Structure formats: structure tokens, C-alpha cells
Image (spheres, rainbow, N blue to C red):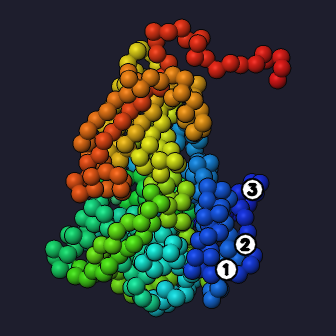
Amino acid sequence: MSLRQFLEGERSIDGQVTEVAEEVSADFEAPAVMKANDGGPVVVFRRIRGHRGVAVAGICGTRERIYRAIGAGPRDYYSKLIDAAANPVEPEEVASGPVTEVSCGADLGKIPVFRHYERDAGRYITSGIVVARSPNGRFQNASIHRLLVLGRDRLAIRLVPRHLYAMHQEAKSRGEDLQVAVVIGVHPALAVGANVGPKLGVDELGVGNALLGGGLKVVRCRRAGVAVPADAEIVLEGVIKADEVADEGPFVDLTGTYDIVRKQPVVQLTGMMMRGDAIYQAILPGGAEHKLLMGMPKEARMYDAVSKAVPDVRGVRLTLGGACWFHAAVSIRKQAEGDGKNAILAALGANPSVKHVVVVDEDVDVDDPAELEWAIATRFQGDSGIIKIRGARGSSLDPSSDQERILTAKVGIDATVPWGKPREKFEKAAMPKTAR
Ligand code: MN
């Protein structure tokens, strides 16, 4: 149920974990190692200069590890995510746990927060699950936010207009600070659960618990009053100030480009809890883990939508090359001419951030960029297989779009076999079975 249990499981599989024994700096050096291993093994840093504990990175750095984290496969993870969001399982509250081992005043100097890119505003906590209690006390919310270190006990938090933003706005209108805890180092199913996007009022920790199959235990923070995973590595307690903002950014977003500087709310820390041998968890901004955690839950919603438009959907992927945000690949078993186009419309409609979608037949592997390109090369004609839409709602992250009004062009490519021609012209050549 914990980060370290998941890590031990990965160690039992060849090539999934790499150890860095030599001392590295939290400033740029550790992130450079993360970048070199991006999309590959989990990286365990044994020695971070000036710190005692161990740090890990890349926990959710591949699709396969995310599948293992939630106990699903490439074909059934959609339904697993949708079911978990619809049927969260309330965690069991207990009096204490590994994370309550050490309780002390807030001091961010005690944890090795990384500085990633040369123009970053400073050190950023990138794996923090921010758990907040609604101002009326009725529910709690859990979501991942980047957190810029401003000082020993202060952070700037990026709040995009979603649940935590709305909760902060409500607290602000009452003239209150919002109670929060920042949880660092938990089982990856909880990080996936925090990104699935259930409706407001649903505790994402319950969604993560459903992905785990139940059994999650939580402890109540003494200071912040929220319930956090009992086997977390580190928990920072504090409030999002009602009336204080600070410059936040530049920070590298999943495009791999710098996001702009904005005035964002300040988190004032009041204390922290941690394991005696706490493991710090880092996520590389713009790396595969960042992209996959953001993108995979969106695939589930797109799968659901495309399935309503065409009967037999084999796969929906937001590809890594498209930052798991802008490019979708959809594989269908075509049953009528025009299914490809309908799949395009459904995929584009289901996810405003998607700009380009390619639809392929069931014999094309959506996880293989070369196969997708092959389908475009051999099954697509640019004058008839394309759909273009101007001025649709897009993503604020795309520097090529109208970022003021968040409008973008959308393009769909129907790379399914056209039905007017003999199917065998398009079939992949096979070798006789006897040769295998
Ligand atoms: Mn929420």
C-alpha cells in the first residue's frame, strides 16, 4: 500500500529500478539523472548532498508501471479508472501510522526539494498531493499541484480553476485560510487516483483506495485537520492563505517549455510529519511521468466517448510525442465507411486539449509511433481523409495556439482502410506460421 512496497515490487522485475550510489546535488544534478532515465527505470538516489534520506524519481515513468500500480492492463485500465471515480472507497481512519513517527515544526530544508531547469523560479515540489478540507467541513479533496519553495515554511501553489481553486475561493470569500496538507511519497495508485477527476465533493484518496482494491488507512493531521495516508513518507501541514500571493514560475510544463510567471496563492506551513527514514519523491517536469499522470486519466474519458460513437474501440492513447495532452491515437474495428470520421469527432469532443487525432484500424498498435505513421503513409489521403475545425476551445499550454482566448485549430486524420478498395491491398504481409 505504500511507496516503498511498490518500489520493492518493482525491484523484483529486471531493469525497473536503477540505483545512484554517488552523491548528487538537488540543484540540477539529480534532475539531469532523471532526464537521462526519462521513460525508463525508477531512479533511487542514495545520497543527496546536504540531506540524509533517500530520494526516488520516475515511479510512474512508464505505462507498464502505472498498469501495475492500479492492477490493470492496456485494455481494461479505462474501465478501472472510470469505475474507481464513480465508486470511491472511503479509507479507514486510524490513530497513528508510519508517517506519524516524526512530528516537528515546518522546515523545508529537511527535505531534498529539487531545482530542475536553468530558468526555473527555484526549487519545486512536484509530487505533492494537496489534501484540503472544504470550508464547510463536509468533504475533502486531493489533487497534485506544483509548489515553489519561497522559504523555510512557505510555498507558492499553482491553482488552475478546478476543485482546489474553487475551495480556496470559497474560503477567501469567508475571509478564511484553507486548511491543507501536502502529501509526498505514497503508493502510485493514489497519484493516479488524484488525477482521475471525479466530481467536486469526492475525496480522490477514496478513488485511489478503490484503485488499490481497498485497505488504505489514513491518519488525521493534528494541525491541518485533514486525513492523509498513514503510510506516506512526508506530510507538510499548513494553510493556503486567503489574502497572500507571490510570483509563481517560470516552471517547465508538460510541453517541455517554460510556463509564464503568475501571482499565485501562498501556502503557510505550520508543521510537518514524516517517517524517520523518509523517502523524498520527485517527478521531472516535462518528463514522461508528468505526461502520463496527466494524460492517462483523460484517455479513459475519451475511450468512453468514442465507444458511444463507434461500436468497437480497441485503444485510445494520448501519445508521449504529443506530451500526452495534444495528440490522440484511436484504434477501432471499422464496421462501416465513415466510422473513422465519427471516431475523430467523438475523440476531439471528449477532450478539449486534444488538437490532432489519428484514427487507425485494429491491426495498428496505438502504442507504436512507427505503426501509426505507417498507417498514415499507406491508408490516408490528405484531400479526403482529413477533418479541420477552426477556432475550437483548446489548451492554454499550447504556445502555437491563441493563448489569450484559448482557441485552437483541430485536425483529425482518418487513417483507416478505405472501403472502396480491396482490403488485401492494405494488409500487413505475414510470414507462414511454419517459419516461427
Ligand atoms: Mn476533486
Q: Residue 48: where, in percent of width, then height?
A: 65, 81
Q: Residues within 10 Å of mark 2 (few under 14, many from 20)?
A: some
Foreground mark, 1 or 3? 1
Ligand 1 shows up in the quarter that is: bottom left
Q: Residue 332: where, in percent of width, then height?
A: 48, 26
Q: What residue lies at 45% left-to-right and 57% top-to-bottom?
A: 255
Depth check: give the residue in front, 271 or 32: 32
**Cα distance, mark 1 to mark 2?**
9 Å
The answer to whether residue 98 is above or below residue 337 is below
Q: Is residue 217 left or right of residue 56?
A: left
Q: What residue lies at 40% left-to-right and 15% top-to-bottom?
A: 337
Locate residue 225: give its quadrant. Answer: bottom left
Q: Amino acid at mark 1?
A: Val
**Cα distance, mark 1 to mark 3?**
22 Å
> What residue does disc 3 label?
15
Locate residue 42: give its quadrant. Answer: bottom right
Which quadrant is home to the N terminus? bottom right
Q: Residue 28: where, in percent of width, then height?
A: 58, 76
The answer to whether residue 420 is above or below residue 38 is above
Residue 207 visible, this orientation: no
Report if the beta carbon of the residue with label 3 is closer than 8 angstroms to ligand 1.
no
Asked if labels 2 and 1 touch by Cβ distance under 8 angstroms, the answer is yes
Lower sequence index among marks 2 and 3: 3
Q: Residue 392: where, in percent of width, then height?
A: 26, 42
Q: Where residue 24 is drawn, which disc sits there?
A: 1
Disc 3 is placed on an element classified as: loop
Q: Residues within 10 Å of mark 3 (few under 14, many from 20)?
A: few
> What residue does disc 2 label?
20
Report if the beta carbon of the residue with label 2 is closer than 8 angstroms to ligand 1.
no
**Cα distance, mark 2 to mark 3?**
14 Å
Disc 1 is placed on an element classified as: loop
Farthest residue toward the front? 383
